[in-house]
Image (tube, rainbow, N blue to C red):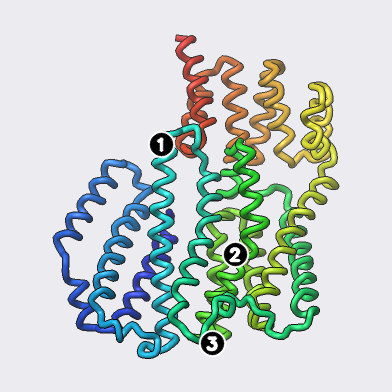
Amino acid sequence: MSFGLLGVVFSFIFFDAVFIKKQDPVLYQKCVRSGFWPVAAYGVLVLMLFVLSKRWEDLPVYGFLFVLPVYLFKRYGFLRRLNPARRDPQVLGLGLSLTLDAFNMALIWAAVMSLLTMGLEFFSSLYPQMQSDLGEVVFISGLSPLFLLWFINKSIRKYRDISFREILGLQRQGLPLWRLIGVPFLAGIGMAAVSSMMIHSREAQPATPLTRMVESTTSPWIFLSLLVVAVFMAPFLEEIIFRGYLYYLVEKIKGKKTAVILIAFLFGLLHVEQYWGDWTAITMVAILGVLLTLQRMWTRSSIPGVITHYVYNGAMTVLSVLVFMTSYPSYYEFQTKFPELTFQEKETLLKKSMEQSPGLAGPYNDLAWIYAEQNIHLSRALELADRALALDPDNYAFLDTKAEVLYRLGRVDEAVAIAETLVREYSANAYSQQQLDKFKSGLKEEE
């Protein structure tokens, strides 16, 4: 968790406190001031755990673990003691009631997802072979919106005049097919074309947290799960939550203009962490968020947004493959025919790829790895691995290749140093630990 994300959580807590205080200011003050010693004891416990961890970069995590449970505990105490009549939507007003529901959902969602994340990490510590940063992200990303939908359905039951489909925007609103499907389809194709051109026109693709996790994962099941979540689940679930529920909420309280600005901003913010470092991708996602939210305002339905989002994701996938095929034909042939190629054919295609696209890092790394596996041309393999790292210095696969080459060259202490770095940075990757153990066994043999 970053300081930015911690700041977002604290902002939710602050605004939630402002709204719930309106229900009964006197009772609110009593609940905030009560239970000093239990809170202090819990704070000391969290502080001790933080000091013992010796991981100062995890300060936001421990701040989160202290603040959120304490606030939710006091919030629950306040609502439990509050006169039930004051929680009635007709007494509070629709705007305030919807706002309190949204903040309540956001805070409980943050607590549940945090507990789930800690549970997965504990499970991974018991079964290291199951460790995977990407697997954890995919699992949380798939489960998170389903939990939100369940919570939304539960919270709106007290409103007599609001249906589940209405609050999610899943109504046609009398739209003709050209506005419901035609325009959204063309918008998705157009956005994908522009995004693909902007992203693939660069000489080098910057590394992002998401690409690093993908590169450090070897399980085909996790890749398949990522495909299902990103391509099939995300467009629908993101649209009905952002352009459905959240847009409905903000529009009812603050109007259409505020809804467009805020929802587009939140949608962009959701994708910043995974694309951090790739500012072109972040910009294109932000523009897509604005387009989808304007479309929601124009049509009064989230269905066109769902269509645009699906078309955009699908078109980006297809265009990425087409661009790759046409830009790097030899490397594409190498990757698609890899299992059936002989060593000489692999070497020929990779050398041809380097000649065609000297700025593409993959061929250098792949040839270095093949040489290391064959235990031949190791000096040349090290040069190739260094060339790949010069183009993409933080790439997990490239660093692993260099470590393997160094190990084969007998420079075991250097291989161990790289492997130890990878284990620290990718602690959930069991393969990294296996490589480190292999290198260390070689070091012992030398001694």
Query: Residue beneath label 1, please?
Result: 125
127 left or right, relative to 345: left
Of labels 3 and 2, earlier in sequence is: 2
Which amino acid type is shown beneath numbered disc 3? Gly
Mark found first going from the N terminus, 3 or 1: 1
Residue 251, above or below 270: below
Dot 1 falls on a residue whose secondary structure is helix
Residue type for callout 1: Ser
Residue plotted at (65% across, 69% down): 287
Question: CA separation, marks 3 and 1?
Answer: 48 Å
Q: Give the label, 3 or 1, closer to the camera.
A: 1
| Discs 2, 1 touching: Cβ within 8 Å | no
Residue 331 found in image quarter: top right
Between 304 and 174, the residue placed more toward the observer is 174
Quadrant in which residue 405 is drawn: top right
Local packing at callout 2 (Cα closer than 10 Å; few below 14, some 14-19, many 20+) is: many
Name the residue furthest left.
37
Q: Which residue is mark 2?
A: 237
Q: Secondary structure at mark 3?
A: loop
| Residue 306 horizontal side relative to residue 166, left or right | right
Q: Is residue 75 left or right of residue 290?
A: left
Residue at mark 3:
255
In front of the other: 63 or 356: 63
Mark 1 surroundings: few (<14), some (14-19) or many (≥20) residues within 10 A? few
Q: Residue at 55% of width from left, 50% of height from top?
A: 138
